[in-house]
Amino acid sequence: MGTCSCSEGDAVGADARLVQATSLRVQEASLTGESEAVLKDVATLPEAAALGDRLDMVFKGTATRRAPVALWSRRPGWTRRWA
């Protein structure tokens, strides 16, 4: 699978599943209306979840708030650094 990385303050350029993250927080107000950034986790959810409950995913149009480094899998052959 392809991967991409992100740093604090970066805009998320595509929907993606987390592969590796350290204290990653994402501002998802544009999707969920929540005012606080959401703490994300690489653990895959055991069952389908509502958009705002998908803690193992990041979504296009959101922004990282605390992310020393995060790697996301998107699709085979895809590698990109979001700036």
Image (cartoon, rainbow, N blue to C red):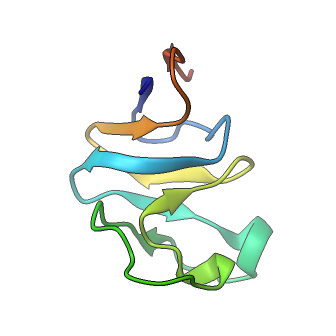
In-image side of 83 versus 46 (left or right):
right
Please provide percent x and percent y for residue 55. Answer: 44, 72
Please provide percent x and percent y for residue 58. Answer: 55, 55
Q: Nearer the viewer, residue 13 or 9?
A: 13
**Image quadrant where residue 40 sits:** bottom left
In-image side of 3 versus 62 (left or right):
left
Picture quarter with the C terminus: top right
Please provide percent x and percent y for residue 63. Answer: 60, 50
Image: 35 above or below 69: below
| Residue found 55% across the figure and 23% down from its top | 82
Please provide percent x and percent y for residue 80. Answer: 52, 16
Q: How many marks?
A: 0
Residue 23 visible in the displayed image: yes
| Residue found 44% across the figure and 26% down from its top | 4
| Residue found 51% across the figure and 41% down from its top | 9
Residue 35 visible in the displayed image: no
Image: 2 above or below 43: above
Picture quarter with the N terminus: top left
In-image side of 20 versus 73 (left or right):
left
Looking at this rendering, what residue extends furthest in the left direction? 22
| Residue found 50% across the figure and 71% down from its top | 37
